[in-house]
Amino acid sequence: MTRHARNCTAGAVYTYHEKKKDAAASGYGTNAHRIGKDSVKGFDCCCLTLQPCRNPVITADGYLFDKEAILEYILTKKKEYTRKLKQYELQKNKEEVRLRIINYKSMISIPTLANECEPNYFIQEESNEKTATEELQKLQSFFKFEKNIVPSKDDAKPSPSISNMAEGREKTLPSFWIPSKTPEAKAAPLKKPEKTIYCPVSDKPLKLKDLINVKFTEVKDPDDKKSLIVKEARYMCPITHDVLSNSVPCAVIKTTGDVITMECFEKLIKKDWVNPLDGKVLKESDIIPLQRGGTGYSAVNDNLEGKHERPVLQV
């Protein structure tokens, strides 16, 4: 094989082509794949369930949720906070009791007279003898089971198993390969849980009273008999009747909950700040841009590339 042959491996340098070829064959490296349109959340889908919303609500940052899903999320977080708070209070009470015991022991004076020390001496001797007897019994029982590991046919009652995984001992057996499960490991001190509930998408404080009901205007086509979920063009702007999709920037009017296009806002509403639907005066804070998913084009989303990390091929 010549030096510049197609499959030459005699070169002193591990080339980029050889590295990519070996990575594809061995399963090492990172796979990158561009996300298509079908993998992007729809503009009318919940950020938690990724399904079209039945009772849509929106946060102040423009993230759309199904009312049932976001209420269940808030309820779960409150239950989690209550559970963590009970554990924290229990740990706090135990620490207070421990400090009281230490203070109480420090207040008791140590006996100095000989007649006061003699009973303690005899008690200590008795406890040492009892401990030695127990150790001897354990040793004798061990030798007895060691001789008869396999029960014979003549034994009416089989000997108990010496396995660490029998008779429920597997539940109390410490895991020596996990640092927090070793016998010497101490329980980590718990911190007081935070009561604030944060949005699962924006990580900002979320309150139930701040959620705004959203009202989508359905596209009325008498010739289209399909179900609403099956339709590609489901909703439209109530003012301009433009069909809404991921490629159309949308906004929500906070006072009424109607979903309009940003083009309608820029060309019609922004001129005199009057809502054409009810004639009321609007403020800039009443317009909430709707966070949409994407279309598969890089101009819509910041990151549309999915990566699968695998072990790195070391050279």
Image (cartoon, helix red, strand yellow):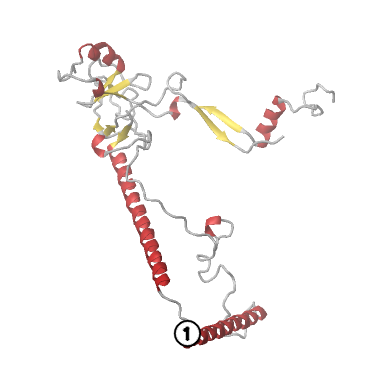
Instruction: Choose top left, top right, bottom left or bottom right for residue 214.
Output: top left
* Residue 22 percent coordinates (x, y): 70, 32
Judged from this view, the residue extending furthest toward the front is: 113
Judge the density around disc 1: few (<14), some (14-19), many (≥20) Cα neighbours within 10 Å.
Answer: few
Quadrant location of the C terminus?
Answer: top right
Going by the image, does 161 lie left or right of 7? left
Judged from this view, the residue extending furthest toward the right is: 1
Could you tell me the amino acid type at mark 1? Leu
Going by the image, does 254 lie left or right of 14? left
Residue drawn at x 48%, y 87% as measured from the top left: 119
Instruction: Identify the residue under disc 1.
Output: 113
Tally of numbered discs: 1
* Residue 6 percent coordinates (x, y): 77, 23
Above-or-below relation of 228 to 173: above
Secondary structure under the numbered disc 1 in the rendered image? loop
Residue drawn at x 51%, y 66% as measured from the top left: 172
Instruction: Choose top left, top right, bottom left or bottom right for residue 163.
Output: bottom right
Going by the image, does 174 lie left or right of 54? right
* Residue 96 percent coordinates (x, y): 37, 62
* Residue 258 percent coordinates (x, y): 23, 24
Quadrant location of the N terminus?
Answer: top right
Above-or-below relation of 3 to 137: above
Above-or-below relation of 74 to 141: above
Q: Nearer the viewer, residue 178 or 155?
A: 178
Going by the image, does 225 lie left or right of 134? left
Residue drawn at x 37%, y 22% as measured from the top left: 246
